[in-house]
Amino acid sequence: MSLQLDFIHHILSLQETYRGTSPDRILLGKGSLSREERTALALQLTAESALRRKLPSWHTAGVFLPSSLTLEQCSSEEAARYKARFATPTDRLIDLTGGFGVDFWALTSVTGQGAYVERQADLVAAARANLPRLLPEAKLQLIHGESIPQLRELISTHQPTLIYLDPARREGEDTTRRVYAIEDCEPSLHTLLPELHTLYRELSLPFPRLLVKLSPMLDVVHTLRSVAGVRELHVVSVRGEAKELLLLIDLTEATGEVKPEAVTFIAQDLHPTQPTPAFVLPEALSNEESAQLRYAVSPRAYLFEPHAALMKTGLYRSIGAIYGLEALHPNSHLYTADTLPEAPFPGRVFAVETVYPFASSQLKALGREIGAAQITCRNFPLRPEALRAKLRIKDSAELTLFGTTASDGSHVLIRCRRV
């Protein structure tokens, strides 16, 4: 059944009436509710806690969810709000892959107006119910249809200065692969960018900026070598987990030579209670190639673990060179120093207490000595849960134990405390 606006408002009204009722009771109970009403209402009630965590503002506004997959696949509120920095109040915005509308909401909160285009009818219906609640003062145009076939009409009508795009993995691709290529996504940037360039030139419009959201499973270097006109690459992690790659593209250069070495990298971890500084490196790939990284004979007074977004950039030599740190091993991606760097480090910093050689015969005794600790393993033969089982220690927020490999190839355990 295609969702209708009256039905959505009816379900939201029922949600208020049945709040606190078990979703299973809704689905299995008897009464005046139809099967469609029960299914939609149970979904709203089931997803309420997850919606509150991922999109607190949307939960407060009382939005409608067309499916559980919608909530799983959309941006979190932190990641969406990060994108607001790319918009200005004078921009004319168009979102060519509207989806649930979370990123469109964040961008439109700055521009005050925007056009949203989405091919799935249920998502459009949800957007027509939700977005006016969230943006009551904004001028919204919510369009059901394929954006690419009507691209000329959309550009001619709306004359956007900022275009947002979230290409999805093409249907039929092997979704079990953790890493895939930008060529596996649609709409294809390889065909879209030249088409947009031609349209803007033919319509005599100023070239826009493009903001493209990509999965962190894409290979960063391959992506930058495949797309022309990229000015900035933003790698965004949320609470320690890499979530998005964002390409800021200048359409004036989108049909020219690909220049990956000229791209500025920005890595940012978003956390509501533990803000971390952004890592910014102009001409990042060029600087990475020339950066000199030293390796420590053993861990020094402090241990440094880059956050997930910085790790995803792959700028391992630049990290050490910029902050004056030595690496423990080429594949460990942990750093050490005798003193703290002047600039705040984008990641976790620990004071090293003791370094133990990793020896199976000593693990039980070591476990009794440590008692309890968080465990992190990098470039280490055991996973954290396996190491914890061998040590027989409990979890603790006060102490951290790193299992890793030193520069001489030996495995070590580093006991430390968060600075």
Image (cartoon, rainbow, N blue to C red):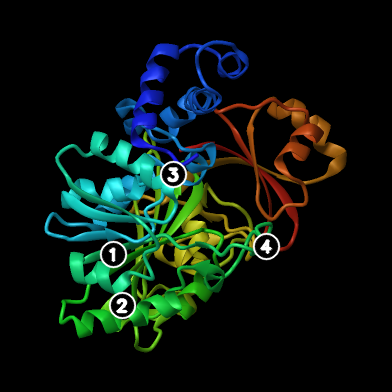
Element marked by disc 2: helix
Locate residue 162, reporting x and y percent: 24, 64
Characterize the local packing of mark 1: few (<14), some (14-19) or many (20 or more) Cα atoms within 10 angstroms.
many
Circle 2: residue type: Leu
Image disc number at residue 163 = 1
Q: Which residue is mark 3?
A: 122
Q: Earlier in the sequence, mark 2 or mark 1?
A: 1
Characterize the local packing of mark 4: few (<14), some (14-19) or many (20 or more) Cα atoms within 10 angstroms.
few
Circle 4: residue type: Asp
Image disc number at residue 196 = 2
Q: CA distance from mark 4 to mark 2?
A: 29 Å
Q: CA distance from mark 3 to mark 1?
A: 23 Å
Q: Considering depth in this image, is 2 or 49 the residue closer to the camera?
A: 2
Image disc number at residue 174 = 4
In this rendering, position of residue 227 left or right of residue 335 = left
Q: CA distance from mark 3 to mark 4?
A: 25 Å
